[in-house]
Amino acid sequence: PSATGTNVTYQWSTNPNFTVILGNEYVDNSGNLNFTPTSTGNFTYFVRATNSNGCSTQPKEVTFVINQGVTNLQVTNNGASFCQGQSFNFTAGGVNATTFSWYKFSNGTGLLFVGATYSPTANDYVLGHNTVYIQASNNSGCNTEIIPVNYTINEVPTNLQISGNQTGYCIGSPIFITPTATGSNITYEWSATSNFASILGSSFVGALVATLVNTIVPA
């Protein structure tokens, strides 16, 4: 509030005759109505200016509506790691949320997507650490704070090659096949199925040299 005069202070009340004066849990030291509502509904307050002589203005009425806010914004896969080229997504949820907006920047600019589930494409990220930002809102115009969603994209080995494989083997002869690939800190897995539902163990794979070693012995 503001008023013309000398040594003016402000008082707030829930009724126009000021039988109840609001305390500092509602009014700050500058005389502003300043509090965080905990319930919804229509609210009316009254304010008046008073000088050091005890003379007061006629009260002014202030009315407003408190709508249900959006709370508990959460995002799946926040902080997760993925492989380059892998399909992945983030799904957001929140209490009383109806809209989810995903942004490139923390100030709410660079809109990437609107919806609960955001699936980044290869154009949306780089190798290493990445961050996008999300804000939830509802039909009453209430918003959450914009929060970061972090994730990491890891490099995928390339140029997988196989050497030492023959078209046929004899019973009792050793099988020794060596894989190589380009990349850092590479290990190799072998399986008898293309979906790698079962990984071959050390009786087939040399753990240190990452080669397939198996001797077929007659029954």
Image (cartoon, helix red, strand yellow):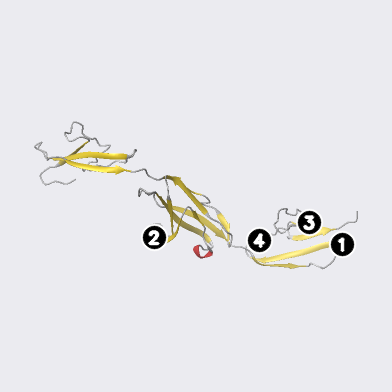
Q: Which residue is mark 3?
A: 204
Mark 3 Cα-neighbour bin, 10 Å: few <14, some 14–19, many ≥20? some
Residue that badge 1 annotates:
173
Residue at disc 3, secondary structure: loop
> Do the residues under discs 3 and 4 have CB atoms within 8 angstroms?
no
Mark 3 / mark 4, whichever is N-terminal: 4
Q: Residue at x 26, y 43 (%)?
A: 64
Q: Is residue 14 above or below residue 146?
A: above
In which image quadrant can residue 160 be found?
bottom right
Q: Which residue is mark 2?
A: 109
Q: Where is mark 4, residue-wise?
A: 186
Task: Place residue 114 in its image quadrant.
Answer: bottom left
Tell me what residue is drawn at x 73 percent, y 67 percent: 162
Separation (CA) of disc 4 from disc 1: 28 Å
Q: Residues within 10 Å of mark 2 (few under 14, many from 20)?
A: few
Please, what secondary structure does the residue beneath circle 4 have?
loop
Q: Nearer the viewer, mark 3 or mark 4?
A: 3
User: In the drawing, does residue 83 fall left or right of residue 72?
Assistant: right
Name the residue type under label 2.
Thr
* Front label number (2 vs 4): 2
Image coords of residue 124 (percent x, y): 49, 63
Per the image, label 1 sits on a secondary structure element best described as loop
